[in-house]
Image: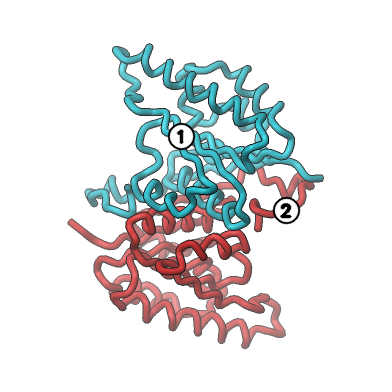
Chain colours: A cyan, B red
Amino acid sequence: MKKGLNFVYTGNGKGKTTAALGQAFRAMGYNYKICVIQFIKGSWKYGELFAKERFADLLDIHVMGKGFTFKSENLKEDQDIARKGWELAKKNLVSDTYFMVILDELTYLLTHQFIDMIEVVECLQHRRQDLHVVITGRDAPDEIIEIADLVTVMQAVKHPLKQGIKAQKGIEF
Amino acid sequence: MKKGLNFVYTGNGKGKTTAALGQAFRAMGYNYKICVIQFIKGSWKYGELFAKERFADLLDIHVMGKGFTFKSENLKEDQDIARKGWELAKKNLVSDTYFMVILDELTYLLTHQFIDMIEVVECLQHRRQDLHVVITGRDAPDEIIEIADLVTVMQAVKHPLKQGIKAQKGIEF
């Protein structure tokens, strides 16, 4: 049985986007093409954006979240960005272009109800049959967990930024 | 305060080695050099071993675990491999060569008592001050959690291999 898998990396711990990035790295070892849609500003850091230049032939990263603030005065703008990102995702879920589509921080759009849960579930279920999808973000809704093939919850036990250690180049960004 | 961080990715879920790989990818975006010591056979898959060729100038991977079986008839051999890997790790923990050292699946060596816990803790604490260390593996011992700066526990909620879906190229290997 060959089938595209649906991965979910959720929980409050560090490692969700980083694990998605590692998945992409592994797949690119076989020269498979990867699409990343980054819904929230800043989850893909400068480090990986520089590193991706070595995979310019394989890795497409779409940063949608410029100005994604969650502040009420920008609600309309945030919703527009979310929907624009989701439309791009929908297109890539049925196209033949990629081996894997990473929907980075998608869960926030669902918990903020910027996009419709029923539509998301349907589009994931009716995607190209052998397309792998990775969804990251805290608080993955039950509906998303339900249809996933793999779910890992990343639990923060210790976090350095909470211990007064500053963010460092090559580590947090 | 600039200080090398000690990351631990543990738990029974997928994403531990993958997150370490993502950390390496981010850091390599700044052209920082990374050392990976893979203590257990097969935790770094063909995919990443192929992909790493694009980072031949930055990423050194030492595969120590050839034949790491945990079967009693090979106990002596397993111990020798574990110790050889640990000696290499010790050297790199004090050298100036790397930005980050990844000790992949180190926890198994500790839980199997192939290497000495007190020595490991001391070497981690007395490593080069600005060296980042990433330790992966299930069941990270309390002594390792205690001295870590960041600990994420990856909990498996669903796993495709347990649902009868075969391992696929670019995903599991």
- The answer to whether A16 appears left or right of B168 in the picture is left
Write the residue at 38% across / 59% down: B28
Q: Which of A81 and B80 is in front in this view?
A: A81
**Element type where label 1 sits in the image:** strand
In the depicted structure, whether residue A31 falls above or below residue A77: below
Q: Nearer the viewer, residue B170 or B139?
A: B170
> Dot 2: few (<14), some (14–19), or many (≥20) neighbours within 10 Å?
few
Between the residue at mark 2 and the residue at mark 1, the CA separation in whole angstroms equals: 29 Å
Residue under label 1? A62
Which-is-in-front pick, marks 2 and 1? Answer: 1
Write the residue at 36% across / 44% down: A45
- The answer to whether A164 appears left or right of A119 in the picture is left
Q: Do the residues labelled 2 and 1 touch (CB within 8 Å)?
A: no
* Residue furthest out toward the front: A57
Residue B87 percent location from the top left of the image:
44, 83
Amino acid type at mark 2: Ala
Q: Quadrant of residue A129?
A: top right
Residue A135 percent location from the top left of the image:
55, 36
Q: In which quarter of the image is residue B90?
A: bottom left
